[in-house]
Amino acid sequence: DAKTTQPNSMESNEEEPVHLPCNHSTISGTDYIHWYRQLPSQGPEYVIHGLTSNVNNRMASLAIAEDRKSSTLILHRATLRDAAVYYCILRGNAGGTSYGKLTFGQGTILTVHP
Amino acid sequence: DTGVSQDPRHKITKRGQNVTFRCDPISEHNRLYWYRQTLGQGPEFLTYFQNEAQLEKSRLLSDRFSAERPKGSFSTLEIQRTEQGDSAMYLCASSPWTTGAANEKLFFGSGTQLSVL
């Protein structure tokens, strides 16, 4: 499976933007980039995903590098409720090695200071 | 939409006992996944079902583990002869498999925390 690399931890202040990086230098042309986050004592929740173009939704924005070897999850104004572990995951189409299951790495622990 | 429900939330058992967990997916979701998570680690895939068919099992799923999804609705995960190394959070997720893996979104339950003494 194509692998992702994320920093172990990051810190932010409340109401400031947060940029969470993810490197995926071995990404294949058909891999989508998915982000999930896991709040304390809860299961992971879907945040956003994209293929090539930048994506926005109510939770976050996803900026994808032109060569697709890296991406950045952007939280525009961090709140205390955004403190969580953020996972960057590559998801292939049917027939690829990542078909069928979502493979989580270690993720980035985001701490938000009031 | 009440979300993915898992029961029980916590289970304490003695080594050697059998335990069974239940997962109720979101209604109409045809895919159901089981994951295991230990402290400080990301969730590890165990197995998944599409409707009632079990399509993939991880090598982590030893002979002591069995999962079922009769009738393609709720699922159970049973661990026989529990060991201390089985202590973990067991997470269930479901998804409406309609548009292919690339766009699939998983919805997770809050998990069952297993402690084996």
Image (spheres, coloured by chain):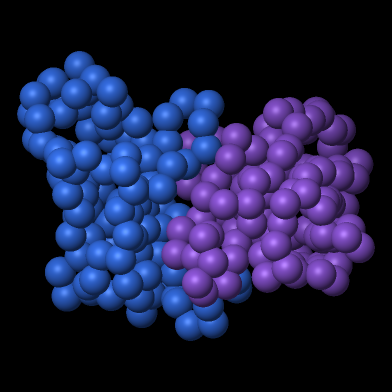
Chain colours: A purple, B blue
Q: Residue furthest bottom?
A: B98
Instruction: Return the residue nearer the eye: A110 or A113.
Output: A110
Residue depicted at 64% across the width and 57% down the height: A90
Quadrant of the rendered image containing residue B23: bottom left
Residue depicted at 72% across the width and 51% down the height: A26
Q: How many marks?
A: 0
Quadrant of the rendered image containing residue B75: bottom left
The image quadrant where one finds the C terminus of chain B is top left
Residue A55, compared with residue A42, is above or below; it is: below
The image quadrant where one finds the N terminus of chain B is bottom left
Left or right of B51 in this view: A69: right
Q: Position of residue B66 (x, y in %)?
A: 17, 49
Instruction: Return the residue nearer the eye: A103 or B89.
Output: A103
Left or right of A98 in this view: A59: right
Instruction: Return the residue nearer the eye: A19 or A65.
Output: A65
Residue depicted at 53% across the width and 60% down the height: A98
Quadrant of the rendered image containing residue A20: top right
Residue A55, compared with residue B89, is above or below; it is: below
Residue depicted at 82% across the width and 53% down the height: A69
Instruction: Return the residue nearer the eye: B24 or A7.
Output: A7
Q: Position of residue B70 (x, y in %)?
A: 15, 69
Residue A50, compared with residue B113, is above or below; it is: below
Left or right of A41 in this view: A86: right
